Image: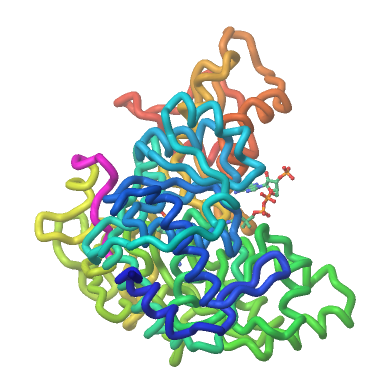
Amino acid sequence: MTANLQCIQRAQKWGSRTAILSNQKTYTYQQLLESSKNVAAHLLNGLEDLNETRVAFLIGPSFEYTAIQWGVWQAGGIAVPLCVLHPLPSLEYVLKNTKARLLVVDAIYYDLLAPFAKEENIRLLRTEWVLKSTTAVNLPIVREERSAMILYTSGTTNLPKGVVTTHANLNFQIKTLVEAWEWQADDHILNVLPLHHVHGIINVMSCALWVGGCCEFLPKFEANKVWELFQQGNINVFMAVPTIYFKLIHHWEQASETAQKSYSKALKAFRLMVSGSAALPISVLEQWQQISGHTLLERYGMTEIGMGISNPYRGERRAGHIGQALPGIQIRLVNEQGVVASENVSGEIQIKGPNVFQKYWENPEATQKAFSEDGWFLSGDIALLNQGYYKILGRDSVDIIKSGGYKISALEIEDVLRKYPAINDCAVVGLPNPEWGELIVACLILKGESKTTIDLLALHQWLKERLPAYKIPRQFIIQPALPRNVLGKVTKNKLREMF
Ligand code: MLC
Ligand code: AMP
């Protein structure tokens, strides 16, 4: 029996079309469907339905990643994609927090995770084992309201929260983008983004597969490789965070005049280029316009909602603005007095619609706090409406940093830093930075009153074992005390000035 999931049913129509290009191999929709059914059978292992068992997977962006995601869904499980850049403690946190019972990993991660899996009684499988062909089994009926995926996002608490979305949420998140950006079956997109966040998973991979298009994976972003692939002439859609456009522009500027001409020529044939996950600096938009002839389409989203606001596909794409509500999604701005803001008055972006997530995983308190009494999701982002276009002004918390398109909690980094033997106290902030959006920096108070120096190499090494590279502070200052207000709270704006 075939699964009733929409992505699977749609894929049956596309049969022999190329779905995925990965590791120099092409895979058709038929191959994707067959492989994912094998995965489902291996995961079910005799059961009729995984009934929302959390199935974590640590797999680089590839055909195998997609086949396993679809396999988990067809078996009735919840997909928990892990980040291949995360050190062991971050992976263990997600596995423990979701209480994952199954874990599928690429061979290179097997030894790393085997001891933890054994200790926690998690069934550990290797990617190639679950892809092996096996006898077909009956697949469960998975209703749209069932939970489909958990992604981890940082917030104003020290530990990341699991964002649970249902199949209905994901289907809607995809459909609104397919409609707004006019996705087509002959679209061929290059994915350079990590696959543990909505940008790569939904906007790039899932939208392409929804319409019968092709998703090509470059497992790790490298500017020269991206330019090489652009020149091959197959790719016509690209989506990335502003840092990636910054790096592509830098590479273009360093190239010879002949290479520059060839790069720019390749971009002329593109249908669509999108930027999001962090504010797109107007300078980057303008430089990209000169290089490519394209005005980047900037949009706004969040792990909890997929995408919510977008500049139009047709019509004016306004620099420094994120656009208008996507089809079927309601947006309002609410000021500090709880009043819905009128044009040109700032307020918090609040969102309602079928795209909005179900709940934070096993955290009813956080879920309740994230919604207004009348059911609007509270984003924490401050914006205003300027002549019909939303414009982001900032966030309501200094403890959330966006660096390289990743959302990072200053409190999480502070918690880790305080465990370092030579550190007594600390405070972490983000500084405006043209390449990274914000650069993470830390003010340290050392143990021992007269201490004014620290071995930064040793500290960096120690942090690398505990945090992914993108969460590691890049600049430090050492102070005798942290700047605090009369209530004793660290004044982070003052701290920013000190840098
Ligand atoms: C890495 N480095 C950083 C850094 N990240 N330095 C400062 N700040 C950061 N944030 C350092 C590394 O330590 C290394 O230094 C060097 O840069 C290269 O590291 P890398 O890992 O190779 O980096 P690179 O591949 O260049 O990473 C840049 C990037 C990556 C832009 C490709 O950050 C990325 O994939 N970002 C996308 C994140 C994303 O998908 N966000 C979407 C979230 S969903 P050294 O010294 O060791 O060489 C969301 C909702 C929505 O936000 O709206 O979409
Ligand atoms: P995440 O939790 O990783 O999904 O990050 C979501 C956050 O990214 C939002 O709350 C915004 O702060 C930020 N963001 C996404 N898109 C944009 C954009 N176009 N401009 C400014 N900020 C953005």
What secondary structure is the magenta-colored segment mainly?
loop
Indicate the quadrant where residue 445 lies.
top right
- Where in the figure is residue 38, as x and y percent of width and height? 48, 60
Q: Residue at x 35, y 36 (%)?
A: 99
- Depth check, front residue: 365 or 246: 365
Instruction: Describe residue 466's horizontal placement relative to residue 359 as left or right.
Output: right
Indicate the quadrant where residue 249 lies.
bottom right
Instruction: Describe residue 253's horizontal placement relative to residue 176 as left or right.
Output: right
Q: Residue at x 47, y 57 (%)?
A: 39
Q: Quadrant of the C terminus?
A: top right
Instruction: Describe residue 304's horizontal placement relative to residue 210 as left or right.
Output: left
- Depth check, front residue: 232 or 324: 232
- Residue 285 shows up from this direction: yes
- Depth check, front residue: 37 or 487: 37
- Where in the figure is residue 19, as x and y percent of width and height? 56, 76
Q: Quadrant of the N terminus?
A: bottom left
- Depth check, front residue: 346 or 225: 225
Residue 261 vertical placement versus 79 (above, below): below
Q: Residue at x 17, y 67 (%)?
A: 340
The reply to whether the magenta stretch includes residue 186 is: no
- Where in the figure is residue 103, as x and y percent of width and height? 47, 42
- Residue 440 shows up from this direction: no
Residue 431 vertical placement versus 456 (above, below): below
Give the residue at the far left of this rendering: 374
Identify the magenta region: 356-365
- Where in the figure is residue 52, as x and y percent of width and height? 29, 50
Residue 230 vertical placement versus 117 (above, below): below
